[in-house]
Amino acid sequence: MIFKGSRYSSTPVISPARIDGSTPQVLAQRVIPAAPGVVSYTVVEGERLDQLAYRYYSEAAKYWLLLDANPDVLDPFELLQPGRVIQIPQNRILSR
């Protein structure tokens, strides 16, 4: 079950047909909304996404906001290369 306010709450549930004829219920691909960066930040050696999320949002679990704001980089470890400039978006308030 997806809780109200989850980043997946507006993602539709689909039932694709498998080769064996079964149709499991799965989430469709999530559309990542535009997350304009409000702060450009240069990564330094040894930083982690959870640490940056805690620094900017006071909640380490919101590391996904950093990933959403930098969609050109698919590998989280590549995002954390020292010297890379990343976008830090505004916090999104999620109600449960």
Image: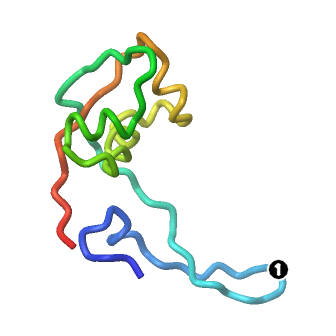
Report the residue that reaches farthest toward the right: 20
Residue type at numbered disc 1 = Ile
Q: Is 85 above or below relative to 66?
A: above
Q: Please tell me in which quadrant of the rendered image residue 87 appears.
A: top left
Residue at 23 percent of width and 31 percent of height: 37
User: Can you give x and y, in whole percent of width and height, for residue 30 in the image?
Assistant: 44, 60
Q: Nearer the viewer, residue 96 or 35?
A: 96
The picture places residue 92, in percent across and down from the top left corner, at 19, 52
Residue at 16% across / 57% down in the picture?
93
Residue tagged by mark 1?
19
Left or right of 20 on screen, residue 23: left
Q: Residue furthest bottom?
A: 22
Percent from the top left, x then y, of residue 57?
A: 20, 43
Q: Residue at x 45, y 21 (%)?
A: 46
Task: Using the rendered view, name the quadrant where residue 96 is placed.
Answer: bottom left
- Which image quarter is the N terminus in? bottom left
Q: Nearer the viewer, residue 55 or 76?
A: 55
Image color mode:
rainbow
What is the residue that sits farthest to the top in this orientation? 83
Which percent across, then down, holds residue 22?
74, 89
Mark 1: which secondary structure? loop
Whether 75 is drawn above or below 24: the answer is above
